[in-house]
Image (tube, grey):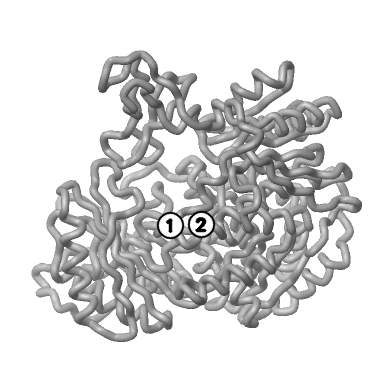
């Protein structure tokens, strides 16, 4: 039996007469001084535990139906591939409300009422029709498809037609999106198109009861369409017939704590096991996905033109900030362009991927700067709240009146966050209607939808926001995008940094000119001739991807190799490095075709009071890496580590 505890083996329990509980059944068992909800993973006639020591299963959880074998097998795969205890995987798949031993009965799930779409179903372009045909060619078998479409090319319409076909065959559909922020507009469109079809949402922003109801509705088959973030890929389904992964390149699909799974990769594995199609869509596919399509493992469907008649990709140009020095983050060229759009009653987006007012508070007298006492990171100034906040551990403190180091009152904010840019725009665009969208401004439930409704109604002139605005949203009146402070990602030590920056710039650029009016993108940079900015301006993903893949091949990085990262952290200084050195010796003793690197400090060396370090291993073959990891992990568990918390991250997205 698997339990929600950090163990590597299942526990044995006695099943007394009168109780029936086969594999996949959820049960309540005594555990330690308390009781837990557990999952039966196997039944046997005998146990290695002495009969008098076996505790009995108390009861079967009646309001959670047993998992089907296919759902149970998916959990087993995740446990084996990501090197985590099966109990942890089972717990991660079950909503928190359903993990409670004692809880109030859930109300019956009722899908939200939806009004039919006001506009008729659009006619498909020739490219869309061909892409849909590619997606439908394998509707009754495992058929992975990369839908590579430029921004505004109508990928969502292809998704909806695939889902329509799936529903017509009496089966369920799973529609994955990377972030909660993308769900409101997309959910309205899905519900409008399928007004008579029960649609369930699944994401961490839901109330616990709602999330549990959606889980049960998917399992029972009552929910015909599930629209959700990465957690939805682990939900049970009665008869899943197709999976769509929108913005498949997005890093948000990778869970960064606990069970570090990739929802995109699990979706492909699930489709393979069920023998159903899976469509991965993006304007900027991950290099791993692009390589799979290039080598024929995935079918490739392309949408090279925008779906709206007369709409074209925006013109992209750089503003040399060495010559046009920004004031409060804004160059004079960008300010002029914003004023022109306001005069023409068009909308603009100013993109700065850093929330708060300023990344750091600085003392001009002694160079003190605001740092977190628990993390190796700066405290971010949030001016309106008069707080310094750590965006890593959540620590908050009041803004000091004087420098804590020298007593000087000459404290100044350095750098721009969304709040500071918003204030600067209000100063130079008198009378403009400006809205800011980031985690702080949209913390209240429904706040994001309210702002987006005002944007679509034409009640906003300028949007200021983070990556929440970079993808998935459609603003027909938006013709200008200004990008601030993107240079910081150009020279990162992370080998994925260039790929991510290119994707981010392409996605945010794609918000401009999606209707009849032409779009323009202005990128402020100290490096106007950098090849990455030239690649964005060319709108040529294929050339960028081929050049980036060649760099990866030479360096021996994915998709030409497979990685795993052993992460360690401790509150005792030096312990993580010591643990990893021992782990490296164990790894090298195992041998085999696996390269073991030396331990290094993590990119964020200290977080929430824990010192952090990591150890990278690399193999040319995935199977060889998996065999090595299973052996290595078993040795690490056996050896133990009293003062160190450690975890394996298979296919890490951040180094």
The residue that mark 1 highlights is 493
Residue 85 position within the rendered picture, expressed as x and y whole percent measured from the top left: 30, 66
Residue 46 seen: yes
Local packing at callout 2 (Cα closer than 10 Å; few below 14, some 14-19, many 20+) is some
Whether 221 is drawn above or below 444: the answer is below
The residue that mark 2 highlights is 497
Residue 241 figure quarter = bottom right
**Image check: 391 left or right of 183?**
left
User: Residue at image x 68%, y 77%?
Assistant: 299
Whether 448 is drawn above or below 132: the answer is above
Residue 365 position within the rendered picture, expressed as x and y whole percent measured from the top left: 34, 20
Q: Are marks 1 and 2 in contact (CB under 8 Å)?
A: yes
Residue 527 position within the rendered picture, expressed as x and y whole percent measured from the top left: 60, 48
Q: What is the C-alpha distance between the residues marked 1 and 2?
A: 8 Å
Figure quadrant of the C terminus? bottom left
Residue 444 position within the rendered picture, expressed as x and y whole percent measured from the top left: 53, 30
Considering every residue shown, the one lying at the far front of the view is: 323
**Image check: 633 left or right of 391?**
left
Tag on residue 249? none
User: Residue at image x 63%, y 72%?
Assistant: 546
User: Residue at image x 69%, y 45%?
Assistant: 318
Task: Between residue 109 and residue 514, name the one nearer to us.
Answer: 514
**Image check: 455 left or right of 10?**
right
Callout 1 secondary element: loop
């Amino acid at each position: 039996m698997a339990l929600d505890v950090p163990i590597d083996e299942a526990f044995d329990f006695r099943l007394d007469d009168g109780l029936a509980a086969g594999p996949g059944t959820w049960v309540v068992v005594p555990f330690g001084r308390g009781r837990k909800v557990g999952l039966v993973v196997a039944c046997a006639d005998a146990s290695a535990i002495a009969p008098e020591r076996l505790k009995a299963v108390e009861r079967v959880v009646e309001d959670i139906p047993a998992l089907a074998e296919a759902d149970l097998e998916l959990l087993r795969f995740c446990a084996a591939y990501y090197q985590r205890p099966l109990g942890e995987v089972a717990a991660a798949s079950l909503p928190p409300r359903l993990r409670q031993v004692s809880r109030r009965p859930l109300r019956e799930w009722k899908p939200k009422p939806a009004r039919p779409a006001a506009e008729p179903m659009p006619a498909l372009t020739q490219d869309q029709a061909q892409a849909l045909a590619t997606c439908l060619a394998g509707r009754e078998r495992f058929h992975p498809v990369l839908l590579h479409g430029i921004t505004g090319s109508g990928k969502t319409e292809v998704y909806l037609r695939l889902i329509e076909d799936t529903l017509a065959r009496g089966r369920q559909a799973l529609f994955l999106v990377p972030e909660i922020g993308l769900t409101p507009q997309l959910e309205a469109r899905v519900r409008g198109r399928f007004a008579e079809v029960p649609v369930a949402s699944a994401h961490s922003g839901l109330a616990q009861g709602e999330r549990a109801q959606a889980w049960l509705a998917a399992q029972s088959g009552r929910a015909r369409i599930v629209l959700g973030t990465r957690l939805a890929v682990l939900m049970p389904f009665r008869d899943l017939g197709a999976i769509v992964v929108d913005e498949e390149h997005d890093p948000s699909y990778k869970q960064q704590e606990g069970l570090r799974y990739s929802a995109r990769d699990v979706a492909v594995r699930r489709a393979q096991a069920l023998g159903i199609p899976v469509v991965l869509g993006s304007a900027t596919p991950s290099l791993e996905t692009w390589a799979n399509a290039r080598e024929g493992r995935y079918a490739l469907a392309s949408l090279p033109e925008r779906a709206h008649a007369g709409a074209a990709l925006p013109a992209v140009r750089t503003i040399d900030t060495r010559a046009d020095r920004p004031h409060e983050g804004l160059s004079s060229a960008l300010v002029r362009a914003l004023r022109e759009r306001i005069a023409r009653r068009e909308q603009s987006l100013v993109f700065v991927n850093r929330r708060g007012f300023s990344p750091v508070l600085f003392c001009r007298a002694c160079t003190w700067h605001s740092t977190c006492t628990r993390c190796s990171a700066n405290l971010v100034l949030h001016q309106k709240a008069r707080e310094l906040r750590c965006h890593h551990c959540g620590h908050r403190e009041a803004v000091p009146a004087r420098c804590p180091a020298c007593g000087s009152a000459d404290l100044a904010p350095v750098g721009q966050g969304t709040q500071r840019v918003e204030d600067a725009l209000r100063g130079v665009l008198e009378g403009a209607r400006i809205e800011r969208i980031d985690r702080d401004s949209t913390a209240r439930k429904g706040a994001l939808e309210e702002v987006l409704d005002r944007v679509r109604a034409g009640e906003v002139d300028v949007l200021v926001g983070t990556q929440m605005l970079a993808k998935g949203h459609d603003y027909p009146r938006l013709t200008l995008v200004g990008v601030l402070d993107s240079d910081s990602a150009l020279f990162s030590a992370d080998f994925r940094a260039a790929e991510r920056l290119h994707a981010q710039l392409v996605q945010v650029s794609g918000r401009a000119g999606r209707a009849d009016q032409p779009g323009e993108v202005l990128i402020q940079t100290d490096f106007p001739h950098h090849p990455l900015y030239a690649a964005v301006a060319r709108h040529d993903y294929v050339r960028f991807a081929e050049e980036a893949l060649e760099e990866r091949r030479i360096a021996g990085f994915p998709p030409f190799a497979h990685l795993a990262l052993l992460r360690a952290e401790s509150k005792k200084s030096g312990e993580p490095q010591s643990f990893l050195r021992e782990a490296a010796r164990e790894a090298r003793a195992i041998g085999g075709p696996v390269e073991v690197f030396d331990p290094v400090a993590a990119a964020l060396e200290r977080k929430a009071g824990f010192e952090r370090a990591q150890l990278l291993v690399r193999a040319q073959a995935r199977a060889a890496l998996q065999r090595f990891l299973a052996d290595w992990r078993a040795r690490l568990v056996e050896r133990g580590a009293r003062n160190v918390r450690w975890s394996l991250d298979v296919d890490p997205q951040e180094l």
